[in-house]
Image (cartoon, rainbow, N blue to C red):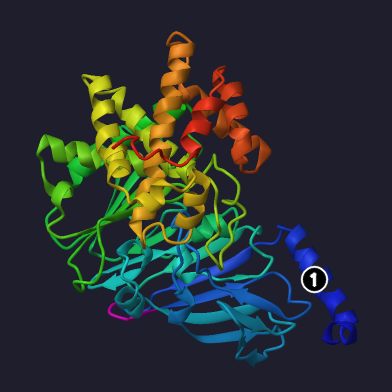
Amino acid sequence: MRRAGFGAIVLALAAAYGLMARAPAGEVAYGFRYERAGDAFVSIDIAWPEPLAAPRSLVFPRAVPMGYGEQRYDAFVSDLRAFTPDGGISVPEREEGPRWRLPAGARRVTYRVDLRRMEGEIRAASDASRVRDGYLGALGYSVFAFVEGSEPRPARLRVSGPEGWPVFSTLAPRAPAAAAPADVRASDFYALADSQIVMGPRAAVRRIAEAPVPLYLAVYSEGTVDLDRLGRLAAASLARVAGYFGTIPFAHYTVHMELLAPISPDHEYGMSMEHLDSSTYYLASPFGPASSTAPEEELGVLFNFAHHMAHAWVPKRAYGDGYLPFQWEIAPVIDSIWFAEGFGQYAAIAALAAGMPDPSAYRQRMLARRFRSNVAGAPDFLRQLPLVALSRVASTRYAEDFRTGRLVFSRGGLMAAAIDDRIQAASGGTRSLRDALRFLVAWSARERRGFRVDELAGLIQEGAGVDVRAVIDEWLRPLPDAAVR
Ligand SMILES: [Zn+2]
């Protein structure tokens, strides 16, 4: 009845939605302001080129890209106001989910986000932004909202901090960070949301020489850390991974690390996250591998960097169905996390192995440690799920119930290793999985979509010239009781 009675409005809404969805032209202007050192809040300002033709939703992300879970970032938002060009100010109405209703005519919104409460309430350190004494570190998706339908539009971001604070954005990194507002651009909302902001006198920002693209280290540490060593390991990882994939799909790269004193025993540290042209690392003191110089620990740091850098290719730029366009409000259900996480990590292992004194020994050791032991130790009810079903389960609880995440990446990693072996054996060592992954990265850039699981064998064959369908099928099946134990 309502729909019939408001037919004209529905049509107008559809027209307005269509216009916005079709027309990425017209930059959305974002402002991020941290006013005074010690404040808990940041102030966000979003303005778009033309007033809204009809009421629309302002949407805050809850799903974390490649996080396979959700965080209720909208819970930390306050003081939301909408502005019209004629000077009108209104308080948007809260809708269901992470949405507020903006009135017709609105052209700008402002709100505040409480980062101190965010860090307190989100226990996964890798999902939260934070302010500390002399420091702010912010994840784009934890603070930036979008007007529904405007996600394809390019964004411009102005970041400002307290007087004299150096300001750094992963969208346009500079070292040393300048004590002046940063004015940067993102190709769309995803690129904006997947970027990070670092500021403050206690953030160490430097550019690392001898990397295949400009490489930056942005570190906040509540302890002692050897930046030269971290920079050297990051540069070595990036060089190996870029060499493996053969092309570099980003103009610069940032390693953002926070070495933190835990704020409670319930907070979880030691997690890392990949982004389009950066990766973020959240470690708790005493920082273990990051501050140790034992060779074994050094290899661990090297692999952690390589793992998250490899994700800039897989799955950020070669992925299965469901990754892009990203669904921000509810974590998307994805069939191929085993590819994203397993093949991504396997690529890092293969890339590093190539530079080791004994490549085969390194590979075997990593396969055993990273993948085989997890598969052997997994509970039967998860082992007995077909791999796509396990991926769907892990889509919303990957880290929250890490039994799902660990098993899905481990089965994927072993599938990748088996495919690599098959390709190398069938081609007399002239081809490898590397060729297939290089092909997939180019294919994804060209096709601008994710592959379906049933397309993967064909794509690998196109890229590497070997039929691996039987290997894929075998690893997609439930694990036999006796296998890999
Ligand atoms: Zn990963």
Asked if one can make out residue 467 in the rendered structure from this viewpoint, the answer is: yes
Q: Position of residue 220 (x, y in %)?
A: 24, 59
Q: Position of residue 116 (x, y in %)?
A: 32, 78
Q: Quadrant of the N terminus?
A: bottom right
Name the one closer to the observer, 9 or 381.
381
- Say whether residue 199 is left or right of residue 79: left
Q: How many residues crowd around disc 1 within 10 Å: few (fewer than 14), some, or many (20 or more)?
A: some
Q: Is residue 36 magenta?
A: no
Q: Quadrant of the C terminus?
A: top left
For label 1, the SS is helix
State which region is magenta: 37-41
The three-letter amino acid code for the residue at tag 1 is Ala
The residue under the point 57% across, 78% down is 97
- Say whether residue 54 is left or right of residue 210: right
In the displayed structure, would residue 79 be above or below residue 278? below
Q: Position of residue 77 (x, y in %)?
A: 47, 81
The main secondary structure of the magenta stretch is loop
Location of mark 1 (residue): 16
